[in-house]
Image: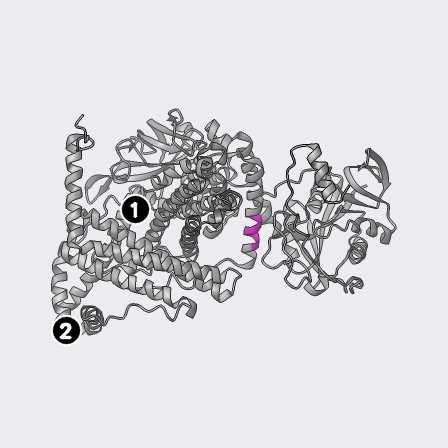
Amino acid sequence: MIRIAAVSVARRLALAEARLLHTTANLACAKVERRAPVESNSFVMNIFKGDANLTQVFPYPDNLSEEQVETLGMLTDTCQSFLKEKNDPMRNDREGKISDEVMDHLREMGAFGLQVPEQYGGIHTNNQQYGRLCETLGYTDLSLSVTLGAHQSIGFKALLLYGNDEQKAKYLPDLASGKTIAAYCLTEPGSGSDAMSISSRAVLSPDKKHYILNGEKIWISNGQTAEIFSVFAKTPIEKDGQTQDRITCFLVERSMGVQNGPPEKKMGIKGSNTTTLRFENVKIPVENVIGKPGEGFKIAVQVLNNGRFGLGSAMCGTMRYCIEKSTEHATQRKQFGNTLASYENIQEKLARMQMLHYITESVAYALSGNMDRGYVDYHLEAAVSKVLGSEAAWWVCDEAIQIHGGMGFMQEVHLERVLRDLRIFRIFEGANDILRLFIALQGLQFAGGHLKELQRAMANPTANLGLIFAEGSKRVKRAVGISSPPTLDAYVPARLQMPAALLARSIEQFGASCESLLIKYGKNIIGEQFLLIRLANSVIDIHSMMCVLARCTRTLQKNLPTAEQEAVLVDLICSEASERVARNLGQLRSAEKLANYKRMQKTAQAMCQTGGVCTQNPLGV
Amino acid sequence: MSLRILVGCKRVIDYAVKVRVKPDHSGVVTQGVKHSLNPFDEIAVEEAVRLKEKKHASEIIAVSCGPAACQETLRTALAMGADKAIHVEVSEAEYATLQPVHVSKILAKLAERTQANLILVGKQAIDDDLNQTAQMTAGVLDWPQGTFVSQVEPEGDSLKIVREVDGGLEHIKVKLPAVVSADLRLNEPRYATLPNIMKAKKKPMEKLSAKDLGVDIAARIKVVNVAEPPVREAGAKVENVDELLGKLKDLGRI
C-alpha cells in the first residue's frame, strides 16, 4: 500500500518536476543547483517540504556573552541619551536634513562604522548588537535611521563583505569615521523591483586600466551627501567565447565625476537625503571593482539580504515608541468618566500592538542571532522579517493615532511624522509584494527539488528504499488522516504545548498545500500570484509562531520576570496565526475562492480598459 | 603639581526608573532594574577628565564599592576617560547597610594606596541622598575639603574653587591634597563615544575587598522599614478667595 502510493505520487511528481520552476531570475538569490536538491537548515525553507527543521530555531539565539551584553548596554545607553537630548526629529523633518551638529556628534561618537572591524577604526559590533542599535535609532528618528542605514547597512556593505584588503584599507577608515558617507546605487528609472534589468553600463578603456561608466540611478539615499558609491552596472563579460552583459559592482568616488540631482521631495523620512545620480563617462580604475566582474548581481542581492535584519530591528524601536505614547495617552485621557485604558476596545488595540511588537522582535533577533551563529541560508527569514516589521509598525502607528483621536492627527504628537516616515519601509529594500513572491517561489523551488529527488529514487527503488519509505509513509499517513504533525513537544516546556501543537498543525497543513500546488500547477505556479501571496502570508504567520515559541521557551527556562506574560502572548499569537494559516491555505483550493480570483482578474482588466473606476455613478451623472 | 585623581563612582538606580518598594518593606526593588552611574559622580568623572585634558592631571582612578555589577558602572567611567578602575567588592547583604562612614574609610585607604592627591566625588548619590562621603573622607584623611563646587582650577599646589552658597558664590582656595564634591553646575558630562566604550574594556580594573584594605564594614544601622510616600490626595478648585477662606474654615485650618 505504501509503496503503491509512493509510486503514483512520484509519477505525478515527475510531471510536475519536469516543468519545474525556473523561478526567480529577477527575484534574486543564488541560482539553485539543479542536479542535487539543495540542503538547508533554514526553518522557513523546510516548511515548504512540511518539515519542521529546528536547527536554527532552538535554542533561541543567545550568543552574546555577559560582557557583550554589558558593552551593548553601554552603547545603547549613550546613543539613546544623546539622541533624546540632542536630536530633534521634527526639525530634521522640517529642514529636510539631519542637523549638522547631530551629524558631527554622531561622527565623534563612532556611529558610522558600527560593524567595521576595529583595525579599520570601527567598533565591530556583531549583527545582534547592530540590530539593537538600529532599534534605538528606529525609536527616535527614522530619517536618521535611514541616513545611517543607507551608509552602513547597505552603502558600503559590498566593500565590507566582498572588498579585498587594499580596498578596505583605502576606504573603510574614512567611512567608519563618517568622514566620507556611502550610498548604495541599484535602482534606475527603468529598473525597480526587476533589478536584473538595469541599463547603466561600464566598459573597459582600451588600455584596460579603467571602466567607463554611463547611466542614471534614482532614489539614492545619501545621493547628495555621499562621497563613496557602491554602483551596480552591466559590463560585457566573456564566457565560453561569447560576450554577455553581466552586472558588476563598482566602488565609485564622487571625484571621479558622479553628479547628483536636487533632493527629492518625499512623503516621509524627509530628514534623509534622496537624489538621482548621473554617470557620464565616469572613469573608474579597475582596482575599484568589488568582487569579480560579472558577480555584481549576487553582491547586490546579498548586500540587501544582509542589510535587511537591521530594518526589522529598527521597526521594533518605532513600534516601542508608538506603544509607549499609546499607553501614556490611554492611562491619562478620560472620556465618559473613565480612562481610555479601562475600555475593552482600547485594551484590544493595545494588546494587538504588543503582540505585533513581540512577533517582530522575536523574528528580528532570531535572524540577526542566526547570522551571528554563522548560518548563511537566511534570505527567506530576512524577507519575512522585513515584510513583517514594516507592516506591523505601520499598523501599530496607525492604531496609536486612532487611540489618540484628534490629537493623533496633530503634528505636535509626532505620530503623523512617524506614520509618514514608516510608509516607505513597505516599499524600499525590496517591496513587500515582491518579497512575498520571492518567499513563496524560493520555498516552492526548494520543495520541488526534493520532490525531484524522490522521483529519481523511484528509478532505483531497491537502493533508495529508506527514502521512499519515509516519504511515502508521510504522504500515506496524511492521505488516510492518521498523520502525526511534526512534534515540538521535546523542545518547548509544558506551558507552551498548546500553542506548539497549533504551530505543528500549521506546518503540516502548509507542507501538504505546497505539494499539491506543485503537483497541480507545476512551473506555472510562477504566474499564480493570488495563490503565492496567500502562501507567503502563511509562511509569515508560521515563522512568527516558531520564533515566539522559541523565544518564550528561553524566557521560561531562564525564568525571567516577564515569563508568564510572554507565554500569554504566545497563546494569543499562535491561536490567531494558526487560524489565519488554515484560512489562507484553505483559500488555495477552495473553488469559490479560485472563482473569486478570476472575478477580481476580470474586474481589474475592466478597470484598466476604462482607465479607472469601471462602474458608473448611481445617479448616472 | 600634577594631580592623581581618585573619583568615586556609585552605582545607583537610574534616574528615569520609577522606584518601587519591596513587598516586605525591607528596601526597594533593585533586581531587573536599570542602574547607572550616579549623575553627580558622572559630573565628578567629567571634571577629572577635563583636568587631565588640560594637562593638570596625570592619572584618573575610578572607584566603586558594591556588588559585582559595579564593574559595569566603572566601565562607564573608563569609557568617559578614566585610566583605571578599582572595584571594592561588597556583598549584596553587606551593601544594604554600607554607609558613607564605611566608604569614606575605604576611599581614604585607597588614596594612600594609589598616592592620589585629589579625591573627587559627587556631592550626593541620588538613591540615599546622604551627602556625607566627601566630608567624612576629608575628616578621615585630615585633608581640606571643597564641597558643592561649581568651578575648580588648579593653581600651584592648591585648587581655586567656586561654591554655590545661599545668596551667592563663595570663592575659596584649598591646599592639595584635598577632597572635592561636585555640584550640578560644575560641568555637563560628555556622552561616551562608542570606540571609547570598546577601549574601556581593555583598561585595567583592580579588584579588592574591604578586608584587603583593613576597613571594617560591619553594619552601623538597621533598616527598620521602607515605605512609599503617601499618595497625594486630590485637591479641589475654588472660584474666589471667599470660597477659599470658607473651605479652610470648614477644614478647621484657620
The residue tagged 2 is: A3
On-image quarter of the N terminus of chain A? bottom left
Span highlighted in magenta in the image: A70-75
Q: Is residue A358 visible?
A: yes
Q: Residues within 10 Å of mark 1 (few under 14, many from 20)?
A: many
Residue A582 location in percent, x, y? 26, 58
Residue A240 location in percent, x, y? 20, 45
Among the 4 quarters of the image, the one containing residue A601 = top left
Please, which colouring scheme is shown? one colour
Residue B152 location in percent, x, y? 78, 37
Q: Residues within 10 Å of mark 2 (few under 14, many from 20)?
A: some
The residue tagged 1 is: A435
| Mark 2 and mark 1 residues within 8 Å of each other at the beta carbon | no
- State the SS at label 2: helix
Q: Indicate the chain on which mark 1 is placed.
A: A
Image: A377 above or below A100: below
At label 1, the amino acid type is Leu
**Which of the pair B201/A398 is nearer the observer?**
A398
**Which of the pair A66/A208 is nearer the observer?**
A66
Residue pictured at 35% horizontal, 68% vertical: A488
The residues tagged by marks 2 and 1 sit, at their Cα atoms, a distance apart of 39 Å
Q: Which mark is residue A426?
A: none
Q: Is residue B34 left or right of residue A352?
A: right
**Is the stretch drawn in magenta largely helix, strand or loop?**
helix
2 and 1 marks on the same chain = yes
- State the SS at label 1: helix
Q: Is residue A136 left or right of residue B68?
A: left
At label 2, the amino acid type is Arg
Image: A473 above or below A523: below
